[in-house]
């Protein structure tokens, strides 16, 4: 990945730093702060060399400015000067004045220098210092994924979801990983959470397609486990979700499409509220329930699946029910799924046999 593409990727991350890892910054003058903003604007335009020049000038005036040191390290790293990036960060690590982003920059610099072990060590140190930073778990998972160590990659993303349920990219990677296994429930759930967190990007649309694929596999792919589809008494949240879905196979027996999924998920919700909701409260399903009560669920289903599943039918739906979509979008602007640490029912970390597929089928970053 060249530096500009990598920069665009970095700037797309929605970094949520744990409060214990955040550092307040005061500026010596409004002019210096304005220069800093200019440097960040240069980074946003994929001009790391211009940003480097600006941050170097500010550092002369404010040699102890944490944000400048970190931003300069990032611009060095994105410009290809990995050693200079690490040298810039070294005093911050020595003085224990770092945040999660510093560890990410250092890990990327080590990775770009073919120092995978050092990168993983940096991220381990970062997680020890910032245990609620979803970003660091995500980055560790990406390194494992690049090493084709898919089991540890998935473990890291799931740990990131458990630690920081608001950080969206762990859901993205976990969904991609699960859809390649027999565990379609988590592919569907994590995929939908991600779509709600990043709806209007190519990555969000690709996840919508992945969800359709996961529903197809859930209902129409024979399992290697002869008992997988005969869950009598669910012993976990995942089993309850799967049993509920499979009991409604007749709704989608003629295929997976937006209309059938709307009916499927509506019936699923009725059953869930009656049978499982008290035992397994879940933020995403609470959101479904609220939308159904407020008359937005059909529009939501179109929003999630319609355009990617059948653009022509979606346009036809919009021509008739466009006001419903506008009403849903107004609703969504005020209310979205509230996913918290209490929603972490996925505690399994035994992935033996999960990834028994040809390694060239693994999704690429």
Image (tube, rainbow, N blue to C red):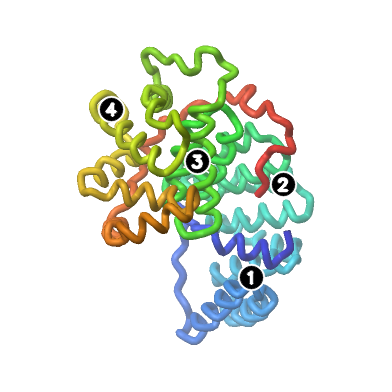
> Which residue matches tag 1?
72
Tag nearer the camera, 1 or 4: 4
Of marks 3 and 2, which one's residue comes earlier in the chain? 2
Q: Secondary structure at mark 1?
A: helix
Q: Dot 2 surroundings within 10 Å: few (below 14), some, or many (20 or more)? A: some
* Residue at image mark 3: 212
Label 1, label 4: how far apart the Cα atoms are? 55 Å
Does the image show residue 172? yes
Q: Residue at x 23, y 26 (%)?
A: 274
Closest to the observer: 316 or 200? Answer: 316
Which residue is tagged 2?
118
Give the mark nearest the N terminus, 4 or 2. 2
Circle 3 SS class: helix
Judging by the rendered image, the residue that carries numbered circle 4 is 271
- Where disc 2 sits, the SS reads helix
Establish if 338 lies above or below 3.
Answer: above
């Amino acid at each position: 990945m060249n530096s500009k593409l990598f920069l665009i990727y970095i700037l797309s991350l929605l970094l949520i730093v744990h409060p214990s890892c955040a550092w307040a910054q005061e500026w010596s003058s409004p002019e210096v702060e304005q220069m800093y903003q200019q440097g960040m604007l240069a980074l946003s335009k994929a001009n790391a060399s211009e940003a480097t020049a600006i941050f170097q000038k500010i550092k002369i005036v404010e040699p102890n400015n944490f944000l400048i040191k970190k931003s300069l390290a990032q611009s060095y790293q994105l410009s290809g000067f990995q050693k200079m990036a690490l040298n810039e960060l070294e005093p911050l690590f020595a003085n224990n004045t770092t945040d999660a982003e510093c560890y990410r920059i250092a890990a990327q610099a080590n990775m770009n220098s073919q120092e995978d072990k050092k990168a993983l060590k940096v991220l381990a140190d970062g997680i020890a210092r910032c245990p609620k930073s979803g970003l660091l778990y995500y980055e560790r998972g990406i390194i494992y994924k690049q090493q084709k160590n898919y089991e540890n990659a998935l473990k890291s993303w799931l740990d990131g979801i458990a630690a920081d349920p608001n950080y969206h990219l762990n859901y993205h990677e976990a969904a991609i990983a699960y859809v390649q296994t027999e565990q379609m429930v988590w592919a569907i759930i994590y995929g939908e959470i991600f779509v709600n967190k990043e709806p209007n990007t190519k990555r969000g649309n690709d996840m919508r397609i992945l969800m359709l694929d996961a529903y197809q596999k859930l209902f129409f792919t024979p399992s290697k486990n002869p008992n997988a589809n005969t869950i009598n008494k669910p012993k976990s949240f995942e089993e309850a979700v799967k049993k509920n879905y499979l009991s409604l196979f007749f709704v989608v027996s003629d295929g997976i499409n937006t209309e059938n999924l709307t009916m499927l998920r509506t019936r699923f919700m009725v059953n869930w509220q009656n049978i499982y909701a008290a035992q397994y409260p879940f933020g995403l399903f609470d959101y479904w329930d609220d939308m159904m009560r407020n008359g937005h669920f059909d529009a939501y289903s179109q929003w999630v699946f319609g355009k990617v599943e059948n653009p022509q039918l979606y346009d036809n739906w919009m021509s008739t029910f466009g006001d419903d979509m506008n009403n849903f979008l107004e609703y969504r602007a005020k209310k979205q799924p509230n996913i918290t640490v209490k929603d972490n029912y996925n505690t399994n970390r035994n992935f033996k046999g999960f990834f028994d597929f040809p390694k060239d089928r693994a999704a690429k970053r």
